[in-house]
Image (cartoon, rainbow, N blue to C red):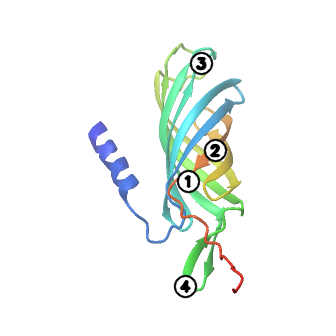
Amino acid sequence: MKNISLKIIILLLLGKSLHAQDKTAFGLSAIYNFPLQTVGAGFRIQMPVANRFALVPQIKYMPSFNNIHEAYGGINLHYFLINNTFSLGTRRVVNPKRPVIYLAAGVEYNRWINFKRTAQSEAKQNNVLPEAGLGLSGGWNFIRIFAEGKYNILWNESYGEVGVLFFPFNNRLQRKNNCPKP
């Protein structure tokens, strides 16, 4: 099962989209779980799959100094409500300074490392958790800031995530060089 998942992720990373203009991005984030008052860190890869969609595999870690020590691995689908691409003739062009607003939905595997029974009867040491949320990103061609609010549907928990996305494969912006005539 792990080999199949790894192969799918590699194929998605190597695949190219005919419609998407942004390239694959890598991100780091800080996470805060509001009801549990825990903090953590995350890593993600944002892969465009169509003009308004991106697949976002991610991992998150809540360190042991929190009351709940846990790790997550999952995937989200982002649907861009307001996108930063527009048509210019027959081409699609990215305007990185325009903000992006998106819906996020996905599923995560959760490993509760210091597991103990709680009032949350559905909680186990290993869990599969559906989530939904809303996000916003903005910035420049190679670096953008993002913020997300998400809701864990199974445990009725909300959390916020703030981070930075790096777009190392985006094309440099074309600038016209107007040289004076000699």
Q: Secondary structure at mark 3?
A: loop
Mark 2 or mark 3, which is nearer the start of the sequence?
3
> Residue 180 falls in which quadrant of the image?
bottom right
Relative to 165, is 119 above or below? above
- Label 4, secondary structure: give it: loop
- Counting residues from the N terminus, which is met first, the one under dot 2 or under dot 4? 4
Instruction: Residue 145: tell me if it is visible.
Output: yes
Which residue is at a point 36% across and 56% down the rendered structure image?
14
Which residue lies under the disc numbered 2? 164
Q: Of the residues shown, which amino acid type is indicated by label 4?
A: Thr
- Crowding near the residue tagged with mark 1, few <14, some 14–19, many ≥20 C-alpha atoms within 10 Å: some
The reply, left or right, for residue 13 in relation to residue 4 is: right
Front of the two marks 1 and 3: 1
Question: Can the viewer see residue 1?
Answer: no
Chain-order first, disc 1 or disc 3: 3
Of residue 96 and residue 37, the one placed in the foreground of this image is 96
Give the label, 3 or 2, closer to the camera. Answer: 2
Q: Quote the CA–CA distance across marks 2 and 4.
A: 31 Å
> What's the distance in space between the residues labelled 3 and 2, CA to CA?
25 Å
**Quadrant, the C terminus:** bottom right
The residue under label 4 is 90
* Mark number, residue 151: none
Specify the amino acid type for callout 2: Val
Q: Residue at x 65, y 77 (%)?
A: 176
- 75 is higher (above) or lower (below) than 156: below
Residue 164 in the image, given as x and y percentages of width and height: 64, 44
Where, quadrant-wise, is the N terminus in this rendering?
top left
Q: Amino acid at mark 1?
A: Phe
Tell me the number on the disc at residue 167.
1
Q: Which residue is mark 3?
A: 68
* Mark 4 to mark 1 CA distance (whole Å): 24 Å
